[in-house]
Image (cartoon, helix red, strand yellow):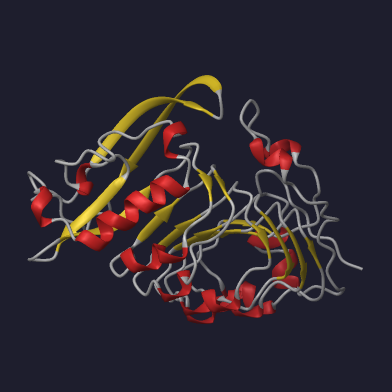
C-alpha cells in the first residue's frame, strides 16, 4: 500500500478563465488501496457525500471526477481520501478547495464524520461550518477561509484538540473570539484575518506551543496582548496588528470575498505592551504584508 494519492487538474475558478492547478495529497498516515472496491464502501459515508454534493450545487462544481458514478468507490472520487478499516472503506479527508461549492452543510453531515481528519473547503461559497463539527474527535485540519460564513464563532470548537490547522480568514465572522486554544497542543497554524472580531486575542493562544503561523489582523480587536505569546518559540509568521488595508491580500481576478467583507476598524491594543511582544515575531514589522502593533 502507498501512503499518498495525488491529483492535478485544470479548471475554471469563479467563472474566470484561469488555468489553476488543484494539487492535493492524502495525509501520509492514510492508506491508499491499489484498487478501492465499491462493495466495501461504508454506506453512511457514501450517502452523506451524495447529500453533501446535492446541497452544494454539484452541477456547477469545477472538478468532480467520478462523483456519483454508481460502480466507482467514493474513495476514487475527486478530492476524497479514505482508509480501509478491515471491513469498510471509510471517508477520512475532503479536499475541495476552489471548487465552486455553493450552499450549506446539512444537519446529517455529522453522520459520515466519525473518521474524518481533513476538511479543506477554502475559497468557495459555503455559508456555514458543518453542524456539530465540534464532535469530529479526529479532525486535524479545518480550512474554511474565504467563504461567506457569517455570525459568531462557536466556543464548542475548543473540543477539537487534535487540530493542526484551523482557518477561516476572510469569512464574515464577528463578535468576541472565543478562548479556544487551551487544548490544541498540536496546532501549527491558525488564520482569522479579514473578519470583524472584537475583544481580546484569546489568552489560551499562548498554550499552543507548536504554533508557527497565526493571524488576527484586519479585525477590530482590543484589550491587552497576552504575554504568553512570548513563549511561542516556533512562531515565524505572526500578524495581529492594526493594519486595515485589504489590497495586499487581494487575489484579483478571483477575490469573491469582496462581496462579504465586513467593516473592520483595525486592532488597537492596550498600552503598555510587553517588551517581548513588541520585539518578538508578533510585532508585525517583518510580517508579509506588514502588520504593525498599535496601542493606546
Say which residue appears at 46% left-offset and 37% top-offset: 99
Q: What is the number of callouts on the image? A: 0
Residue for point 65% across, 36% down: 256
- Taking the image as shown, residue 247 lies to the left or right of residue 127, namely right
Residue 130 lies, with reference to residue 51, above or below; the image says below
Q: Residue furthest right?
A: 296
**In the image, residue 4 lies at what x, y percent?**
20, 47
Quarter-wise, where is residue 225 in the image? bottom right
Residue in the image at 56% along x and 24% along y: 15
From the viewer's perspective, is residue 234 above or below residue 285?
A: below
Corner quadrant of residue 7: top left
**With 251 as the anchor, is 129 left or right in this view?**
left
- Residue 65, picture quadrant: top left
Query: In the rendered view, would you say 249 is above or below 293?
Result: above
Q: Answer whether residue 170 is visible to the viewer in this image.
A: yes
x%, y% of residue 280?
A: 66, 64
Residue nearest the observer in this picture, 105 or 191: 105
**Could you tell me residue 296's position as x and y percent?**
92, 68
Looking at the image, the residue that sits furthest to the top is: 17
Q: Nearer the viewer, residue 30 or 58?
A: 58
Report the front residue among 258 and 25. Answer: 258
Q: Is residue 213 visible?
A: no
Left or right? Give the position of 49 relative to 288. left
Residue 158 screen position, x and y as percent = 52, 78
Amino acid at each position: 500500500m502507498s501512503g499518498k494519492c495525488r491529483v492535478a487538474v485544470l479548471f475554471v475558478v469563479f467563472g474566470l478563465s484561469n488555468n489553476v492547478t488543484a494539487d492535493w495529497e492524502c495525509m501520509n498516515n492514510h492508506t491508499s488501496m491499489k484498487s478501492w472496491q465499491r462493495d466495501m464502501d461504508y454506506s453512511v459515508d457514501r450517502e452523506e457525500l451524495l447529500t453533501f454534493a446535492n446541497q452544494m450545487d454539484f452541477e456547477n462544481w469545477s472538478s468532480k471526477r467520478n462523483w456519483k458514478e454508481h460502480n466507482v468507490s467514493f474513495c476514487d472520487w475527486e478530492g476524497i481520501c479514505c482508509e480501509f478499516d478491515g471491513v469498510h472503506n471509510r471517508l477520512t479527508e475532503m479536499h475541495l478547495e476552489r471548487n465552486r461549492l455553493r450552499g450549506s452543510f446539512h444537519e446529517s453531515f455529522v453522520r459520515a464524520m466519525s473518521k474524518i481528519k481533513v476538511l479543506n473547503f477554502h475559497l468557495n461559497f459555503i455559508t456555514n461550518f458543518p453542524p456539530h463539527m465540534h464532535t469530529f474527535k479526529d479532525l486535524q485540519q479545518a480550512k474554511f477561509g474565504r467563504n461567506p460564513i457569517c455570525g459568531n464563532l462557536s466556543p464548542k470548537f475548543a473540543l477539537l484538540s487534535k487540530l493542526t490547522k484551523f482557518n477561516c480568514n476572510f469569512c464574515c465572522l464577528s463578535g468576541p473570539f472565543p478562548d479556544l486554544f487551551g487544548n490544541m497542543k498540536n496546532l501549527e497554524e491558525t488564520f482569522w484575518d479579514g473578519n470583524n472580531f472584537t475583544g481580546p486575542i484569546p489568552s489560551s493562544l499562548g498554550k499552543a506551543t507548536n504554533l508557527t503561523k497565526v493571524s488576527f489582523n484586519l479585525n477590530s480587536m482590543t484589550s491587552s496582548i497576552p504575554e504568553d505569546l512570548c513563549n511561542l518559540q516556533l512562531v515565524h509568521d505572526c500578524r495581529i496588528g492594526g493594519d486595515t488595508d485589504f489590497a495586499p491580500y487581494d487575489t484579483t481576478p478571483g477575490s469573491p470575498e469582496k462581496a462579504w467583507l465586513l467593516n473592520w476598524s483595525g486592532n488597537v491594543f492596550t498600552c503598555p505592551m510587553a517588551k517581548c511582544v513588541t520585539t518578538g515575531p508578533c510585532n508585525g514589522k517583518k510580517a508579509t504584508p506588514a502588520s504593525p502593533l498599535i496601542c493606546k
